[in-house]
């Protein structure tokens, strides 16, 4: 079956990203799914098998939160959990591995390297590419897409720098795929900065306590469907259990 992008044109070639390994690196695809019987655990009591729940395919599950919140850990864990149950789950992130995503990461290491409007422009370009080349084709192919950051991060981070949040939302919702559920991993900035203090690469453009406090406030303002605000101050196991309960309601 041919795959088309969000504009209705034939989609360009795309790749799936493996979830990051324990060092935080993201390994470029192809994303290998287990064959039937491989890495597949028995269904939990009351759970149906993936084969009997095809409506779960094509879901878009998003993880958001300030830097150091643990969202990448949870996104990676969810992908593995879904795969272990036979679901075709794939992982993508923003900024992406594309041209504009690489430029964002390069600029982010220096504070003041971009104006807020320049940041917004780069994120918009990167997201359009990500939607066309990765998200839309993966969903059309029946994958469950787990996405590490989306346009809600742009609303929070660039909104905290003074850009109108309503404008950012409107710009993105012209082309962005609507997510089925958005997990916002909530943590205070002091704990956040403590977690990321040992990272080799620091993103000085975004990692200041007062700024992250405002970003957090915007994240916490997202309410109702499809948002789920998760207490990020607990153990990874506890957080993962809560996330799985919500995802399980979607797929079973």
Image: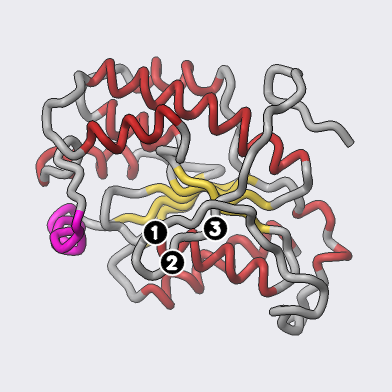
Which of the two residues, 217 or 28, is positioned nearer the viewer here?
Answer: 28
**Left or right of residue 127, residue 3 in this image:** right
Q: Which residues are magenta?
A: 189-200
Does residue 23 sit above or below 98 in this rendering?
below
| Residue 108 percent location from the top left of the image | 22, 36
> At 46% across and 50% down in the image, what residue appears?
63
**Left or right of residue 21, residue 252 in this image:** right
> At 69% across and 17% down in the image, what residue appears?
7
Q: Tag 3: Cα neighbours inside 10 Å, few (<14), some, or many (≥20)?
A: some
Please report contact status of discs 3 and 1: CB closer than 8 Å, yes or no: no
In the picture of the structure, the residue carrying the numbered disc 1 is 25
In the picture of the structure, the residue carrying the numbered disc 3 is 18
| Residue 135 percent location from the top left of the image | 62, 38
Which of the two residues, 9 or 44, is positioned nearer the viewer here?
Answer: 9
Does residue 209 sit above or below 82 in this rendering?
above
In the image, residue 147 lies in the stretch drawn in magenta: no
> At 81% across and 52% down in the image, what residue appears?
55
Please report contact status of discs 2 and 1: CB closer than 8 Å, yes or no: yes
Distance from Cα at disc 3 to Cα at disc 2: 8 Å
Magenta portion: prevailing SS class: helix
**Left or right of residue 127, residue 11 in this image:** right
| Residue 85 percent location from the top left of the image | 71, 73
Please report contact status of discs 3 and 2: CB closer than 8 Å, yes or no: yes
Q: Tag 1: Cα neighbours inside 10 Å, few (<14), some, or many (≥20)?
A: few
| Residue 228 percent location from the top left of the image | 48, 52
Image quarter in which the N terminus is found: top right
Under tag 2, what secondary structure?
A: loop
* Residue 21 numbered tag: 2
Distance from Cα at disc 2 to Cα at disc 1: 6 Å
Which of the two residues, 21 or 175, is positioned nearer the viewer here?
Answer: 21
């Amino acid at each position: 079956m041919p795959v088309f992008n969000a504009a209705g044109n034939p989609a360009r070639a795309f790749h799936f990203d493996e979830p990051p390994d324990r060092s935080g690196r993201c390994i470029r695809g192809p994303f290998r799914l287990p064959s039937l019987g491989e890495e597949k655990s028995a269904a939990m009591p009351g759970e149906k098998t993936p084969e009997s729940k095809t409506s779960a395919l094509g879901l878009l599950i998003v993880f958001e939160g300030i830097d150091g919140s643990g969202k990448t850990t949870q996104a990676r864990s969810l992908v593995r959990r879904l795969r272990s149950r036979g679901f075709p789950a794939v992982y993508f992130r923003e900024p992406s591995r594309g041209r504009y995503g690489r430029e964002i990461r390069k600029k982010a290491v220096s504070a003041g390297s971009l104006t807020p409007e320049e940041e917004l422009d780069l994120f918009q370009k990167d997201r359009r590419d990500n939607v066309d080349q990765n998200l839309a084709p993966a969903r059309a192919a029946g994958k469950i897409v787990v996405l590490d950051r989306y346009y809600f991060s742009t609303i929070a981070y660039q909104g905290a720098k003074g850009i109108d949040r309503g404008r950012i939302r409107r710009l993105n919702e012209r082309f962005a795929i609507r997510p089925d559920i958005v997990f916002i991993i909530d943590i205070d900035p002091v704990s956040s900065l403590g977690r990321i203090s040992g990272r080799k690469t620091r993103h000085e453009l975004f990692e200041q306590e007062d700024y992250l406090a405002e970003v957090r406030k915007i994240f916490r303002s997202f309410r109702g469907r499809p948002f789920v605000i998760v207490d990020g101050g607990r153990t990874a196991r506890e957080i993962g259990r809560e996330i799985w309960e919500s995802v399980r309601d979607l797929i079973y």
